[in-house]
Amino acid sequence: MTELLGRLLEILEEENAFDRTGNEPVLHFVHPEELQKRLSIQLTEEPATKGEIETTIRQTIRYSVKTFSPHFHNQLYAGVDEYGLAGSWLTDVFNTSQYTYEVAPVFTVMERQIIEKSLELVGYPPLPEGDGILCPGGSISNMYGMVMARYKMIPDVKRKGLAGLPPMVCFTSEAGHYSISKGAHWLGLGTDHVYKVKCDEFGRMRPDELKAAIAEVKKQGHLPFFVNATCGTTVLGSFDPLPEIAAICREENLWLHVDACLGGTLLLSKKYRDRLKGIELSNSVAWNPHKMLGAPFQCSLFLVKGKNALHEANCAGARYLFQQDKHYDVSWDTGDKSLQCGRKVDGAKFWLMWKARGTKGLRESVELAMSTVEYFFERIKSRKGFRLVLPRYEGCNICFWYIPPSMQGQQETQEWWNKLYEVTAKIKERMMIEGTLMVGYTPLSYKNIGNFFRMVVTCQPPPTKASMDYVIDKIEKLSVDL
């Protein structure tokens, strides 16, 4: 095994898989049908030779997107922290599950320390009055919030289900993550019972609209139970006004969950954490260190107020795992408070990363990323041809259009805008084919806006002004003849 893994590391180095200089392509794009042929993707009766396996490994590296590249700005994540990567490899070596201290002693105490520090970061009570768990992604973390809220309002729902109850309604902004709708489906609430609250011009939930929506739902005889506020919306990176929303939830006796999967990383910064002012007033929080901060996938936290809250809402009492007469303190067995049985030991990756860098080091990486966001914003604000979707941004997303020379100075009719939306998609196509840059694009349907670029700046690899300038120059070059 060590020979194979040693050879894998050699190949990764030979193929420059960890390159952060930007000298290597971000990707070598080929269409799916062709990619299957090049990879010899079919599984066969006979085993492959060592040479064939090595070729496949090299092809995998070649045709995979290089998220380590300083020119990858396509998603809400990018490269990984090197200590986090080491932690990820370490966890895979031991191939264990997080459900009991018995089979994951070291990883269990690591997860608890991550939860303790994260509760402190949010402003929640410490263990055991606060609690938390590592989840397989932010969507599941948000669904945990919905489950907790439903159980808190109607504990019997765990045994008796929804029969005989009025429709239970949850609220999120029209810019909120689609996982709330998926959660409503999975929990049997129905997507029709997700109320999308209107946003202001900056993509933030309007408290007055939330209050009106709650009143309307009650008037219909439905049962409001859950409000999802967002700190760092997926597209615009907006932060909902938590103090005002929390006041409404307190008045209406509703569970307030904060989806801080993206924006939660700013809690590490003394300079930027006030953008999440009021987060301590919520009942639960989701935060993904695998996004902006650069922890390896998956690393997603769900944090909650309330002693034994997770256990009470989720326990099923599987006696073959969670025997109460073990020879150690069984409060360290965390599996019965989880939706899952088998659960990857994700906390260890983040623990090693935090241990190696300290809170100070994490803070510095966040503040470097945010200062680079501000640099990029100022550069495109004054650059000919670039136009911002919003006049200011709060998070690590910057949304903009590039207007090519052939369209500059023209009357901006609807036809002109439709062409600009097409141009945006065309520029992205050229990025992908050339392989030198990846920046995402998206429409914003609730504002009736077509395609624009969403530039994301993360902590890994550490961003530079030069890498921001590269994005601007490359977009101009790719669209010179459009």
Image (cartoon, rainbow, N blue to C red):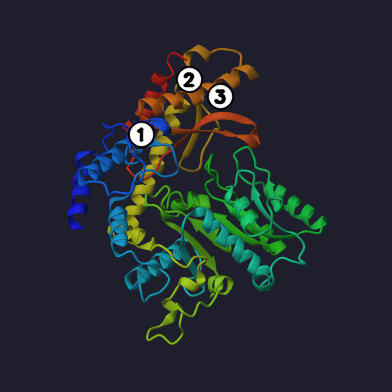
Q: Can residue 105 be seen in this view?
A: yes
Answer yes or no: is residue 408 visible. Answer: no
Residue 334 at what x, y percent from top left? Answer: 45, 72
> Label 3: few (<14), some or many (≥20) within 10 Å?
many
In which quadrant will I find the N terminus?
bottom left
Look at the numbered disc 2 and give the secondary structure of its residue.
loop
Residue 360 rendering spot, x and y as whole percentages = 33, 56
Q: Is mark 3 on a helix, strand or loop?
A: helix
Crowding near the residue tagged with mark 2, few <14, some 14–19, many ≥20 C-alpha atoms within 10 Å: some
Where in the figure is residue 116, as x and y percent of width and height? Answer: 42, 68
Pick whichever, 123 or 228, lies toward us: 228
Query: Under tag 1, what secondary structure?
Result: helix
Q: Earlier in the sequence, mark 3 or mark 1?
A: 1
Say which residue label 2 marks. Answer: 385
Q: From the viewer's perspective, is residue 479 above or below residue 446?
A: above
Mark 3–mark 2 contact, CB under 8 Å?
no
Tag 3 and tag 1, C-beta contact below 8 Å: no
Query: Few, some or many C-alpha atoms within 10 Å of disc 1 (few <14, some 14-19, many ≥20)?
Result: few
* Amino acid of disc 2: Gly
Residue 54: image location, x then y, percent: 23, 43
First in sequence: mark 3 vs mark 2: 2
Considering depth in this image, is 388 or 446 the residue closer to the camera? 446
Left/right of residue 243 with respect to residue 384 in the rendered view = right
Mark sitting on residue 446: none
Amino acid type, label 3 = Tyr
Q: Name the residue under label 1.
A: 37
Residue under label 3: 421
Tell me the quarter of the picture where residue 449 sits: top right
Q: Which of 269 and 104 is in front in this view?
A: 104
Left or right: 180 with respect to 468? right
Evaluate if marks 1 and 2 touch, with contact meaning CB atoms under 8 Å apart: no
